[in-house]
Image (tube, helix red, strand yellow):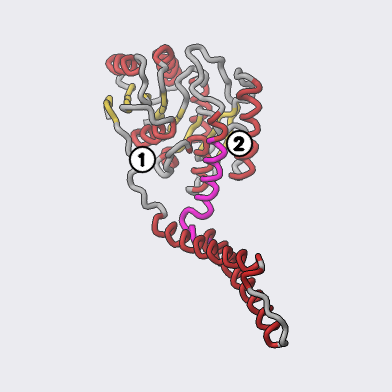
Amino acid sequence: MDISVVIPLYNEEESLQELFLWIKKVADANQFTYEVLFIDDGSTDGSWKVIDALSKEHSEVKGIKFRRNYGKSPALYCGFEAAQGDVVITMDADLQDSPDEIPALYKMIVEEKYDLVSGWKKKRFDPVFTKNLPSKLFNATARKVSGVKLHDFNCGLKAYRKEVVKNIEVYGEMHRYIPYLAKSAGFSKIGEMEVHHQARKFGQSKFGFNRFVNGYLDLLTLWFLSKFGVKPMHFFGVWGSIMFILGFIAVLVVGGIKLYAICNGMRAPLVTDTPYFYLAILAMILGTQFFITGFLGELMSRSSQERNKYQIEKQIRL
């Protein structure tokens, strides 16, 4: 199979039929063999009824319905697991991503041998102060931290080699950083293609300003995991050792001052009279705690077996 189109959605019943027919038109015109996987993230409208009706008319339509709303990352994770195409295309269900971009994305993966190609919506139809400017700031930070030179990390329109989606784990809200996840997994040929951004035709955006705050926290988490996720002792152990050694040296200095005074017949002050003693003890305690945290982190590293299990209510052709 040439292409799998993975579409996560939440309450998008008005756009689904038009989106599928548009994808079908493009795929048929280019003679692609394809499947369209709709991942219904616990919609409360008639989205699943539309998907079910489309599946009865078109064998290319497949679907997964969550019992409740989990988020975009879990939807993509399940879509990636089910995808069978050599090239996997992701796009949003709100018709702001154009299926006309699919042939060019497919060509970059198959002919130009990219591992991942991310869309860049250079000209956007979003509010300037609530979405465009925060998005530019967010993307600039993500480029600096990740080292992946993309203008638009959060663009829903992306293309992947099949091997990429089968070898990365998208969880929590990490869908924003799939290029970073791919790079960390060893897929280094990551490209970008300018794509057309269309004004929203139905409904309203599902994302609020809090996604930018969450995005920065997720970026910090991903940076830490990519650096120290496998060997947390390399972080906690080093800083724990440094703090303990500094605290121990400070205790020796305070004790040495008292011993010097005693040996020279001087009045020896109590070591507890100086704040440096308490700071030294605090440093040693914190250093020990950091060290123990590193040991526990080593034991717990990558041990969670349940974080990507979701309650699926219904499936179509899967």
Magenta stretch in the rendered image: 214-234
Question: Residue extending furthest front?
Answer: 267
At x 52%, y 38%, the residue is 177
User: Which residue was labeled with disc 1?
Assistant: 308
**Residue 314 against residue 245 in the figure, above or below:** above
User: Which residue was labeled with disc 2?
Assistant: 150
**Residue 134 against residue 181 in the figure, above or below:** above
At x 61%, y 73%, the residue is 251
At x 54%, y 61%, the residue is 286
**Is residue 222 one of those drawn in magenta?**
yes
**Is residue 91 one of those drawn in magenta?**
no
Say which amino acid is labelled 2. Leu
Residue 59 appears left or right of 233: left
**Residue 304 against residue 282 in the figure, above or below:** above
**Residue 306 x, y percent position in the rendering:** 33, 44
**Residue 13 x, y percent position in the rendering:** 39, 14
Q: Which one is in front, 53 or 301?
A: 301
- Disc 2 to disc 1, C-alpha distance: 27 Å
